[in-house]
Image (tube, coloured by chain):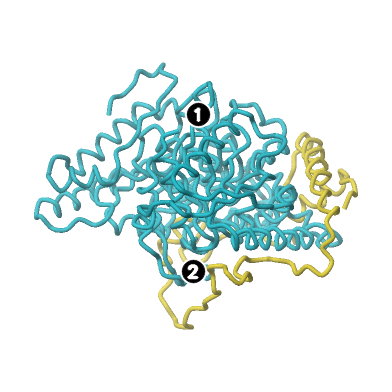
Chain colours: A yellow, B cyan
Amino acid sequence: MTTKVTVEDVKRVAELAHLELAPEETPPMLHDLNAVLEYVAELNELDTSGVLPLAQVSELETAATASVVRADQTLLSLDRAAVMQQAPETDGVFFKVPKVIER
Amino acid sequence: MSSEAKAAENYVEKPKTLAELRAEFVSGQTKAVDLAASYYDRIASVNPRLNVYLSLTKERALEQAARVDALAAKGDPLPLLAGVPVGIKDVLVMKGAPATAGSKILEGYRPPYDATAVAKLEAAGAVLLGKINCDEFAMGSSNENSAYGPVRNPVDTERVPGGSSGGSAAAVAANMAVATLGSDTGGSIRQPASFCGVVGVLPTYGRVSRYGLIAFASSLDRVGPFAAHVRDAATLLGVIAGNDPKDATSSPAPVPDFAAESDKPAEGLRIGVPAEYFAEGLDPEVRAAIEKGIAALKAAGCTVKPVSLPNTKYAVPVYYLIATAEASANLARFDGVRYGYRSPASETLSDMYSHSRDEGFGAEVKRRILLGTYALSAGYYDAYYLKAQQVRRLLAEEYLRAFAEVDAIVTPTAPTAAFKLGEKTGDPLAMYLADIYTVTASLAGICGVTVPCGKTAAGLPVGMQVLAAHLNEGTAFRVARAVEAAGI
């Protein structure tokens, strides 16, 4: 948990997240990631063997949520025309995007 | 509603109570349309300096106000929030109105639907004035991460209003709305309420629907109200709370009359004070103010006793791992395909994704996406994300044990009063540490209220955080009412 993040790591993670960091953005990002990861490493002091992870508080007995699932019915969704109006590029039915595969 | 000169550095003005406004509407002394117009005048006068509102929804507001006036003219019963001018944090969507989340990537987006909390306010008669500035995607503790410029604190315009719902707190402090909605993921309602000297509510996780809230970290995100008076904040929570089939995590628990709950005296309540929240790093003036608040609770007949929350110091690391991991997944949807900003010059789909995201997101959002993606990536998942979730359980269980012994826990909301603009922007970690007293309740899903509790020598507000167990908002309101009544 104390592994230092490298420039290559930052570039790899940026690629995974579809972020394109400018060359001048990378060094400060590297510095900040290492500072935060060094700080969070103090969690290693705690022995958590046998502790179940808690992803949602609904797993707690006293919590408010009960993971209720709604009835499986077909309902009207948002109006297509209203949704497509927000698209950067559309033919009215589909979202249009630049070409996906280079030939 | 006097409008100060632009040069004035203090814009504090206290809104009337809901009861006062209601009496004026019922008697015909005030028309909802006129009140809305006077709020738009106030906004026009002070917004250039405070930068609270990002967009106004005048047409919709005035139509609603006219409906309220028509009801009042006929002598029909008025709904609970009839004619009350309310502002909405720009992470909650309103049909047809801009929804930026403080980000360039959502520039131009006009959502085709209303958030559930927004729709419920309007159904109760509220007049929705417009959309309010915040940190980009609610990520920040000072409102300085907004792509549309920082909000200034109405108490002292050289200081931050807190974040991420800084605009929502400032709006109430400066009487640019009678009440507002905000969102709280790690303290984003409670901390700005403290910095601006207003009441802010963190409802129990699941109490208020998240439908129409632009997601940051879904297991932590909550929608809650700001108001100038505790009872009014309780009334607002009652309006927006309740089960919503559109949010699978929304609670089916019945919604009590929170305002009536808040009327009950605090006498006899057991109040816990955790030593961990009064340790190193707490500003002495904040400590002194909170100690006065605790003395006031004793005087009101509460029993005060120490409680122990020994893992508190691990809460910030746990929070920043879990919140960024969830954010990295949630923010993957902003890709320039369906709505919002698309980078104009892209040859391929892949370039279009990364150019749009790179140009659309600000530095803090990118930092958190990278941190979250790193923590979830192959080889690191167990060490970071899983470990954080395990400690999250320990933190939650610690609270549950404490609430077996006490009805509420009181702490400072933040370790300091409002800091200066630019003071922490160069050091993300220092900014994260400002959330030290608020993130545990976020992780545990419990509820809380920030109530004004005195001032520093420089006149900066101090907020007390009153925490209560899941679904016990009524208890938190009772304690907050007692602190408010003490007039510290």
Asked if residue B214 is positioned above or below residue B193 in the image, the reply reads below
Q: Which residue is mark 2?
A: B251
Task: Identify the residue shown where x is 46% and y is 61%.
Answer: B208
Amino acid on which the number 1 mark rests in the picture = Lys
Q: Are marks 1 and 2 in contact (CB under 8 Å)?
A: no
Marked residue chain, label 2: B
Q: Position of residue B334 (x, y in %)?
A: 60, 54
Pick out the residue farthest to the bottom: A72
Q: Secondary structure at mark 2?
A: loop
Task: Give the answer, above or below, for where B232 lies relative to B428.
Answer: below
Image coordinates of residue B52 in percent, x first then y, are 44, 35
Gap between marks 1 and 2 measured at Cα: 37 Å
| Both labels 1 and 2 in a single chain | yes
Classify mark 1: helix, strand or loop: strand
Label 2 environment density (alpha carbons within 10 Å; few <14, some 14–19, many ≥20): many
Q: The residue under label 2 is which amino acid type?
A: Ser
- Give the residue drawn at x 63%, y 55%: B331
Image coords of residue B423 (percent x, y): 65, 26
Location of mark 1 (residue): B455
Q: The C terminus of chain A lies in which quarter of the figure?
A: bottom right
Tell me which label, 1 or 2, sits earlier in the chain.
2
